[in-house]
Image (spheres, rainbow, N blue to C red):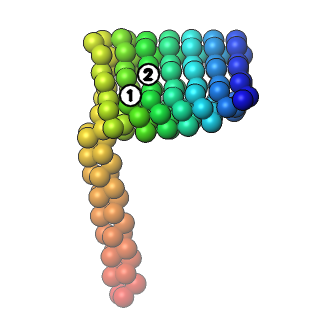
Amino acid sequence: MESTQVERGLVGTVTGDEVDIRESGVGAAASSRDLFLTNGGAGLLAAAGNLTITNGGGGPMAIGGNVSITNGGAQTILAGGGATLGERSFVAFVLSPKVTVEPGATVLCSTRQALAFGAVVSAAILTATRLLRRGRNSSSLD
């Protein structure tokens, strides 16, 4: 099993079986098992296992297992397992079978709200596309 650790650094991409990021900034990280982010930040995060964030945050996250955030944040979480948002954590969108929001945590859109938002945006794009096509077809007949 390959374990990759980044400590006090700035790295573009990190991959490994288990990835541990401490006091660092990473553009993207991918792990075939668990991923840990402590006192740092990252762009895209992907893990087949679990993700644990303490005092840090990241952009979009696609996680096969559970997500746990304490004193941190995320743009979007897509988790196959549960998502636990601990004290002083913030997440914009969470898509997970089970979302636990502990006292002091904030979620802008939970799973139901995120799915509803996605459906509305998709319907709006579909309608706009059809109207544009209809407008092009009628103007070409003139």
- The residue tagged with tag 2: helix, strand or loop? strand
Quadrant containing the N terminus is top right
Q: Residue at x 67, y 31 (%)?
A: 17
Please name whichever residue, 94 or 34, is drawn nearer the observer in this view of the structure.
34
Percent position of residue 30, x then y: 63, 34
Percent position of residue 137, x then y: 37, 81
* Residues at marks 2 and 1 touching, judged by CB atoms closer than 8 Å: yes
- The residue tagged with tag 1: helix, strand or loop? strand
Tell me how many marks there are: 2
Q: Considering only vertical position in the picture, is 140 above or below 20?
A: below
Q: Considering only vertical position in the picture, is 14 above or below 38?
A: below
Label 2 belongs to which residue?
68
Q: Residue 26, located in which quarter of the rendered image?
A: top right
Q: Is residue 63 left or right of residue 10?
A: left
Given the image, on which type of amino acid does mark 1 rest? Answer: Ala
Q: Residue at x 32, y 32 (%)?
A: 98
Disc number placed over residue 83 in the picture, else none: 1
